[in-house]
Amino acid sequence: MDLKKSPLAPEFFPTMPIVDGVQMATAETGLKYKNRPDLLLFEFKPGTSVAGVLTKSTAPGNPVVWCRNSLSQGKARGLIVNAGNANVFTGKSGIQAVETIAKSVSEVFHSKKNEVFVASTGVIGESFDPSKITQKIPNLAKNFLPQDWKTAATAITTTDTFPKGAHRTVKIGQQSVNLVGIAKGSGMIAPDMATMLGFIFTDAQIPASLLQALLNRNVQSTFNSITVDGDTSTSDTLLLFATGSLDNYPALKNHRDPILKDFEYALNEVMLDLAKQIVRDGEGAQKLISVKVTGAVSPKSARRIGLSIANSPLVKTAIAGEDANWGRVVMAVGKSGEKADRDQMSVTFGGIKIAKDGQVVDNYDEKPVTEHMQGRQVNLKVDVGVGRSSATVWTCDLTHGYISINADYRS
């Protein structure tokens, strides 16, 4: 499938810093794609800690189940990711395939099987021969290259039109640490824990329990606040690895230790950057949409209202057609099931108030609203008039391109 680069894509892939304690390599397996890397292998130094959040789908992929079971011990020596086959709903052979792949990596790295994390993305329900992956592993492990994050991010793509990466450098105490993340995702994006595949790496020394707490605390406002099509993937996986490769590292008390404040802020920035890049690469997307909900009874309620708006096909198609049909936004608030006061509600598009106190504003002029909707980014704001809490979610418009991509996905 030959897809044009999204018009919402960043101008370039960022120049990423080196993360000490991480080695990587890519290969071509031909599982689905030809003449491109589709297999990614990472090796981490012994003692690397790991945290993760995984899909809440009741039909999870076999790699998700493997990662969930492996996270409890909090240590990682390897990560292997393939694109082209999701290994979901593939029966006992799929379960065995994950173990076979993890075992092959562990033998090369001289580690335990449950210290190897496995992730897959691609078509659901198609069995595959794991030897196409395992036969590549020994050679990959002998040919680790300088960290090439762009190639790594490209190797895990499916219907993505551009590789996704983000980074920050921050201090913990007096020690500078690097945070680097890559992700893939374009369709089947409505995370309920993480979203798609996302991998973040740092050379900081942070125990797994603290990493997990930091990840849990920041996933709601980032990966769990985006949607492309309202479909939660069977393979959603977000993993955070800390190699602890730096010397003179301060002791940490807990995840709320003030010394971690800047690190957590940087982590949130990397997560949000990656999440918004996924929305920018939404299948067929022509517009990035932000939905800010204020006046809600709680942040959770505000987020649910925001996602109700962001997931509405009527809202998304109206924006695709540059039609300022604000009534559809009101409809989406109402169907959310969350508390809202119809007679106190206000709706704003692009900073222009359209409705307030439950009705359209006096002397409403739609022209400037339409002009705003003709841009690449559309900003919606709704105040539901029942509290002081707020949340922002991000989505994209729904175009004919989305239908074309998904109608042809398996061909």
Image (tube, grey):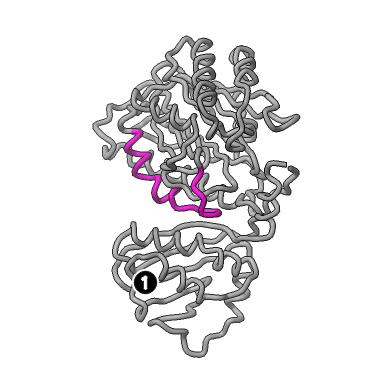
Residue 399, x across and y down, in percent = 65, 60
Quadrant location of the N terminus in the rendered image:
top right
Residue drawn at the location 47% of the way across and 78% of the way down: 353
In the rendered image, which residue does mark 1 sit on?
384
- Quadrant of the rendered image containing residue 374: bottom right
Residue 246 in which image quadrant: top left
Q: Which amino acid does label 1 sit on?
A: Val
Determine whether 106 is above or below 402 in the image: above
Considering every residue shown, the one lying at the far left of the view is: 253
In the image, 9: left or right of 49? Answer: right
What residue is at 33 percent from the left and 58 percent from the top? 299
- Is residue 134 visible to us here? yes
* Boundaries of the magenta span: 211-233
Quick one: 71 or 60, which is closer to the camera? 60
Q: Find residue 96 and report its horizontal and vertical position in percent.
A: 51, 21
Task: Tell which of 93 and 333 is nearer to you.
Answer: 93
Whether residue 227 appears in magenta in the rendering, the answer is yes
